[in-house]
Amino acid sequence: MKKDILLAAGLLLVSCLSAREYHVSPSGSDAGEGTQASPFRTINYAAQVALPGDTVTVHNGVYREWVNPLNGGESPDKRILYRVAEGEKAELKGSELVTSWKREKKGKGVWKAVVPNTLFGAYNPFNEKLYGDWLWSEHTYHTGDIYLNDVSLYETTSLEKVFTPDTIRSLRDPEGTTCVWYAVVEAEQTILYANFGTADPNRETVEISVRPTCFYPTRQGLDYITLRGFHISQAATRWAAPTAEQVGMVATHWCKGWIIENNVIKNSRCNGITLGKERSSGHNLECNDKRLDGTLHYIEVIFNVLRRGWSKEQVGSHIVRNNVISDCEQTGICGSMGAAFSEIYGNHIYNILAKQQFGGAEMAGIKLHGAIDTYIHHNRIHRSANYGIWLDWMAQGARVSSNLLYDNLAPDLFFEVDHGPYVVDNNIALSACSIQENTDGGAYLHNLFAGDVVRYDDPRYTPYHLNHSTEVKGFRTITEGDHRFYNNLFVGGDDAKKKYGLSAFDASQWPVVAADNLFLGSAKPMSGKEQGWVMETEDPNLRIEETPDGVYLISDIDCAELAAFKGKPVDARRLGVAKLSGYPFEHPDGTPFVLDKDYWGKTRSGQAPTVGPVETLPHGNRIRVW
């Protein structure tokens, strides 16, 4: 016994002694030693030599490169850590500077720059069309972009429109903009035309996206990597359909156990972070193979990824936390099956699809397929031109909890063809539409829903799984219903054509149970059922106030008045079993579900919890929510 202890201690000591820290600085050289005194020049060079247990510390500067790691870690305790040095700022960019712009005499504000195609290598984003399954656009756009002082211009569809631009109005530019660009790609060079308005590009910072990603291993299965504290931006990312290889500015490539934390991720042509699938299981199948429709193609993809190791032991279990993600034109975070068993929390996501030049079925602040046992909580998501959080197919065991969603143009929450069990609790959803769903087997608990609720039937067959597993148990069409609504606060709006509250579930095929919900204003319960309290004359007129010290929810009603409405505790016994899958509501570790915390993580009453997301409501009409 003593010999075994000494051996283990010796192995631990050897492991600690063998771990190295490599330093990277713009003043360094890749011929250096990687020490603080003799740092490497590029992060990617350090990524070729770093081994499990090593740390790559990156110092002040701008790094225009694609980091393509050679190795991953060995375990949660023996990772490869990429971090920014304490108190410093390291920018990882998918772009290059363009200078020496020439003014065009023909048009006011129009300039031209010529760049050699050698700048791009094998991937010229100004010649690379945005393309893929479920991408919808009446015009052809490209993966490239031009940035003036870190703000992207709008691609236009002809050279003539650079000189005589149409005013483009969008979520980002509601008053309109004429700052646009167009590219002409020739054999040896690419000619860029841009209308910078009143700005002189030679006196400002102008960059063009060049690389398809910023941090992405081309090798699969590089597990246990941590990426911490970087400013990552301006990559020419491709459209990431769930039937395609998904490559964002940061992408995990079908592996396990990454931690992506405390980064600022901005200005991706399509996606900020992708946790999605690899290419060999299918790549834009609906576009390239017309023998099947998209649903059948995706069913084939599911079995393909299962044959390629989609399991808890090999894929997923990532942590994505405390990042600021903005100005991405497809998603802030997306993942087709690779986000299973993951935790996504503390992220601030905004300005998604804000330019609104193209659309599609895969656009949201967070968009996941196969969110099995995935925990999404305490995120702030706003100013998305599409959904806030969208869980599409196989959100079994998923939990969406304590998120703040507002000012999104599409529903805050969308659950599509999921069979449950899944839990939605303690969320504050304030956009015009709170929920869209065509699912069964959900539990909606202690939420504040201030928008309408949209539901519809869906004839598609989609899978459900063995409990806490990726293994498929069966397939079934969605039979609307089998939901539970307990202790929610519904607020009705002033659009008579919309359904606020639970009235949308009058037509459900399977039973929907509801109790201890509070309906204010025009919000209505289901017909003919006792579901809580109805107060038609009370209109809180909810709105958001953003200040430097936080985000506040403003109401015309004293918040403390709502504290009088008490529900009953919610646990696995009360929630029962999801009808189709046959499984109870559990935590990912298999223990019975119990809802004992509120939006802020404070303990709820075990006998009479307060209706809505916050357990202890203060006096006044202003409450901090972020």
Image (tube, helix red, strand yellow):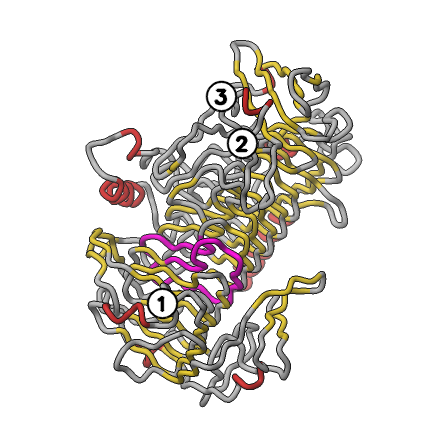
x%, y% of residue 582? 23, 68
Give the position of the C terminus as an image quadrant.
bottom right
Q: Residues within 10 Å of mark 1 (few under 14, many from 20)?
A: many
x%, y% of residue 5? 55, 61
| Disc with the residue nearer the chain's start (2 vs 1) | 2
Please tell me whether mark 1 sits on a helix, a strand or a loop. loop
Say what amino acid the circle numbered 1 marks: Lys
**Mark 3 highlights which residue?**
127
| Disc with the residue nearer the chain's start (1 vs 3) | 3
User: Looking at the image, which is closer to me, 605 or 348?
Assistant: 348
Q: Is residue 99 left or right of residue 443?
A: right
Separation of disc 3 and disc 2 at Cα? 11 Å
x%, y% of residue 279? 37, 34
Q: Residues within 10 Å of mark 2 (few under 14, many from 20)?
A: many
Q: Give the mark toward the camera: 3 or 2.
A: 3
Q: Residue at (31%, 61%) from the top-left corner?
A: 455
Q: Residues within 10 Å of mark 3 (few under 14, many from 20)?
A: some
Say what amino acid the circle numbered 2 marks: Ala
Q: Residue at (63%, 43%) from the top-left corner?
A: 82
Q: Is residue 133 magenta?
A: no
Location of residue 116 with respect to 243 vertically, above or below? above
Location of residue 545 with respect to 103 vertically, above or below? below
**Mark 2 highlights which residue?**
236
**Mark 1 highlights which residue?**
499
Mark 2–mark 1 CB contact (< 8 Å) = no
Residue extent of the magenta highlight: 387-414
| Disc with the residue nearer the chain's start (3 vs 2) | 3
Separation of disc 1 and disc 3 at Cα? 46 Å
From this viewpoint, is residue 420 visible? yes
